[in-house]
Image (cartoon, rainbow, N blue to C red):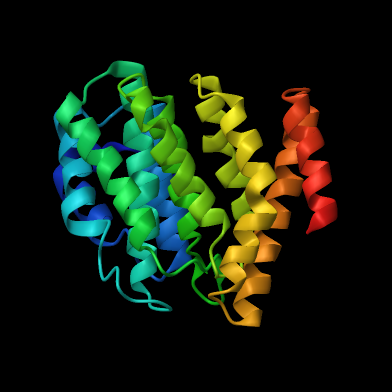
């Protein structure tokens, strides 16, 4: 199938899609990432070979059977199911931007599910030796980006989504696999959708105070993890804004704050 011969898929579509869902969190990185996810991308985005009803069904399965799979666990293989489910949701949300097939209720369930997932996810590992990418935070950021791009999203949700992005930046798990760059995408998407840039500017200026507050409740190692995540995120945001020649005031504020951290 990956090589372009879809004859078998066309004859056995339901069985293959069911099997792809069942193995979406396989610990075999080749199967999970390069085959199953790649095929979902090809079938949903490129060839548009999965109909609206089936995509709606996949979204429902994602929300009710996969996204919160063993969510209380850390350092377990269950993270692969959760992380690659957010990628599947991102593909479905992307198609909805193009074709508007999800109902308002289905879309809102997806939005609520992603927000709740990010509030609960405790396993922030990026690359896992022998098993490939988990990358739960980066993958969820991709789904958030597609969510925010959707015209169905009510602007009243912008503050909550901005906050959930910042919460990820200030995690006590060290984010060392370019999660910062992926989290910037939904942040900039919020600006594109009309969120006031003053929201970001004020938050950047408050970061030293927020970090000092966090310091009171964390051991020293965890505190410095948070500082690392914040500084890395600010540097990446500065580079991105500078490249795009946008929001000079935010850029200036970032430089000032980085000198204080």
Q: Residue at x 41, y 61 (%)?
A: 31
Q: Quadrant of residue 148?
A: top left
Q: Position of residue 5 (x, y in %)?
A: 37, 39
Q: Residue at x 50, y 19 (%)?
A: 194
Task: Please name whichever residue, 255 or 148, is drawn nearer the observer in this view of the structure.
Answer: 255
Q: Left of 22 or right of it: where is 78?
A: right
Task: Please name whichever residue, 91 or 164, is drawn nearer the observer in this view of the structure.
Answer: 164
Q: Residue at x 49, y 72 (%)?
A: 131
Q: Against 88, is 54 above or below?
A: above
Q: Quadrant of residue 68?
A: bottom left
Q: Left of 134 or right of it: where is 113?
A: left
Q: Left of 44 or right of it: where is 222?
A: right
Q: Position of residue 99 (x, y in %)?
A: 30, 17
Residue 175 visible to an observer of this rendering: no
Q: Against 92, is 23 above or below?
A: below
- Position of the C terminus by quadrant: bottom right
How many numbered discs? 0
């Amino acid at each position: 199938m990956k090589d372009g011969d879809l004859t078998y898929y066309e004859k056995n579509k339901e069985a293959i899609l069911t099997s792809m869902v069942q193995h979406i969190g396989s610990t075999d990185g080749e199967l999970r990432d390069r085959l199953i996810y790649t095929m979902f991308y090809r079938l949903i985005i490129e060839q548009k070979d999965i109909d609206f009803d089936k995509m709606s069904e996949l979204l429902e399965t994602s929300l009710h059977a996969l996204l919160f799979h063993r969510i209380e666990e850390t350092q377990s293989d269950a993270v692969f199911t959760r992380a690659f489910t957010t990628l599947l949701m991102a593909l479905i949300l992307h198609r909805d931007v193009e074709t508007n097939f999800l109902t308002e209720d289905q879309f809102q369930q997806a939005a609520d599910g992603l927000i709740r997932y990010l509030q609960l996810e405790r396993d922030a590992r990026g690359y896992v030796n022998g098993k490939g990418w988990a990358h739960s935070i980066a993958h969820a950021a991709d789904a958030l980006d597609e969510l925010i791009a959707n015209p169905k999203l009510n602007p009243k949700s912008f503050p909550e989504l901005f906050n959930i992005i910042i919460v990820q930046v200030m995690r006590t798990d060290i984010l060392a696999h370019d999660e910062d760059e992926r989290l910037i995408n939904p942040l900039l998407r919020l600006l594109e959708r009309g969120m006031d840039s003053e929201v970001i500017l004020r938050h950047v200026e408050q970061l030293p105070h927020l970090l000092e507050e966090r310091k009171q409740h964390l051991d020293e190692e965890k505190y410095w993890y948070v500082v690392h995540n914040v500084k890395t995120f600010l540097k990446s945001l500065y580079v991105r804004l500078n490249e795009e020649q946008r929001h000079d005031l935010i850029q200036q504020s970032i430089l000032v704050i980085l000198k204080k951290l």
